[in-house]
Image (cartoon, rainbow, N blue to C red):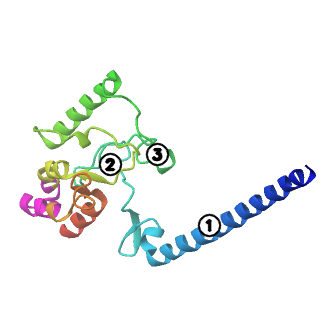
Amino acid sequence: MSSVISRGPVRTWRVALGLLLLTTVVTIVYTFVVSLIGLALPSQANGSLVAVDGRTVGSALIGQSFADEKGNPLPEWFQSRPSAAGDGYDGGASSGSNLGPDNPDLRKTIEERKAAIVRLDGPGAVPPDAVTASGSGLDPNISEAYALRQVDRVAKARGLDAPAVRSLVEQHVQAPDLGYLGEPVVNVLQLNIALAALAR
């Protein structure tokens, strides 16, 4: 009976030490692997920063607003989708609105956004991403349809030919991940950088 009792604590210590060694090895291996990935993919590890003329202007992974100090959209730039993150595209307050599709406040907001887009870009169909925020509030992409809807306004504001601006949009359409996950999208920051270069 005493030998059975004495084996209990020994076995417990052996299991505990084994788990300690296993978690230590996993932690070290994980850190090593992540560090190697960071060295192999430095741009991604540093936040996929986008620079123009040596100056960082944003990240390809985080959306931003192209509006004036009062929040009015600047007509010479392609506009991002709405953001529910803080005052808009606030990385420290990333979130969606959490309002359901039948929520009267959300419906009112969507109608107001539709009206604003029609005033800005003229009559026509308004894509869903133009009036709804993403789950994070930081989505850097818009649909191809929303980008194309803005072509005439951007071209007019910059004194450019609409076909040239449309071609620029089409050059920046990114295919779905793995060719079938999601829909084609356009990164707004990268499109606006190319637009600024086109306007020079």
Q: Which of the two marks, 2 or 3, is nearer to us in this view? A: 3
Tell me what residue is drawn at x 90 percent, y 55 percent.
3
The type of residue carrying mark 3 is Ser
Q: Residue furthest front?
A: 1
Which one is in front in this view, the residue at disc 1 or the one at disc 3?
1
> In which quadrant of the rendered view does residue 87 lie?
top left
- Taking the spot 43% from the left edge, 74% from the top edge, the residue there is 41
Q: Compared to 148, does 120 lie above or below? A: above
Residue position marked by numbered label 2 in the rendering: 67
Mark 1 packing: few (<14 Cα in 10 Å), some, or many (20+)? few
Checking the image for residue 26, the label placed there is: 1
The stretch drawn in magenta includes residue 16: no
Q: Position of residue 63 (x, y in %)?
A: 36, 53
> Which range is magenta?
155-169
Q: Residue at x 43, y 43 (%)?
A: 85
Residue type for callout 2: Ala
Sequence order check, earlier mark of 1 and 3: 1
Q: CA distance from mark 2 to mark 1?
A: 47 Å
Residue at disc 2, secondary structure: loop
Q: Secondary structure at mark 3?
A: loop
Mark 1: secondary structure: helix
Q: Quadrant of the C terminus?
A: bottom left
The secondary structure making up most of the magenta span is: helix
Whichever of labels 2 and 1 marks the residue nearer the N terminus, that label is 1
The disc placed on residue 94 is 3
Q: Callout 2 environment at 10 Å: few (<14), some (14 to 19), or many (20+)? A: some
At which x and y percent is residue 198?
A: 18, 68
146 relative position to 137: left or right: left
